[in-house]
Amino acid sequence: MTYKDVTLVSVNGKSPRIHPSAFIAPGCRIIGDVVIGEDVSIWYNCVLRADVSQIIVGARSNIQDGSVIHCDGPMPSRPQGYPTIIGEDVLIGHMAMVHGCELADRAFVGLKATVMNGCTIGSDAMLAAGALLTENKHIPSRELWAGSPARRVRDIDDAQAAGMQVGVAHYVLNGRMHKAAIDG
């Protein structure tokens, strides 16, 4: 499959693996051991660089414009390194930095937020816009964290969790629309 104005790079014998239903916007750079699932949308000018470990993006997740997703390689204190594992139905806002961490199904990372090595964000949990989640922190399911460094603010209620899933559905449909427009 070819993508218009998208850079796909193989590194160390590892090549990106992209589900045919995924939308990869022009200007994206997908490098190394990256796995992109069904109905994922990777928006304009994102970089996913898995040159030293792996990045997995689960079905229906979206990574919005200008975001950077990376991982960290093996080191003496952590021989397996820090892969970046993004679950299903995850929302990642514009210009986010997601690095060597795990985002559970239905997690949310706000605009310009940063998630560092060893962090986890639980299901239906949210890291607010502009927040910094420092190394090895864990946001439990259904919690909102904000600030720099990020701290717990409150619980996520049912309406907010449902609203995040409306956002996921929107990005799946919007990705299909953009893909059709670009493919002609």
Image (cartoon, helix red, strand yellow):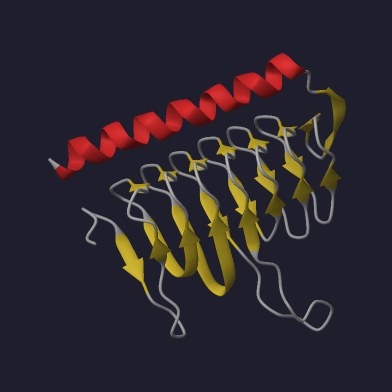
Which quarter shows the C terminus? top left
Where residue 156 sits in the image (x, y, percent)? 78, 23
Above or below: residue 156 compared with residue 12 = above
Where residue 135 sits in the image (x, y, percent)? 80, 55
Q: Residue furthest left?
A: 184
Q: Which residue lies furthest to the top in this view?
A: 159
Above or below: residue 6 compared with residue 112 = below
Where residue 113 sits in the image (x, y, percent)? 65, 39
Where residue 84 sits in the image (x, y, percent)? 63, 60
Q: Which residue is drawn at 36% across and 71% down?
A: 9
Total tally of numbered discs in the picture = 0
Front residue of 152 and 120: 120
Q: In this view, does 102 lie to the left or right of 55?
A: right
Q: Residue at x 70, y 14 (%)?
A: 159
Q: Residue at x 43, y 85 (%)?
A: 13
Front residue of 111 and 39: 39
Front residue of 149 and 91: 91
The quarter holding residue 93 reads top right
Q: Residue at x 31, y 62 (%)?
A: 7
Which quarter shows the N terminus? bottom left
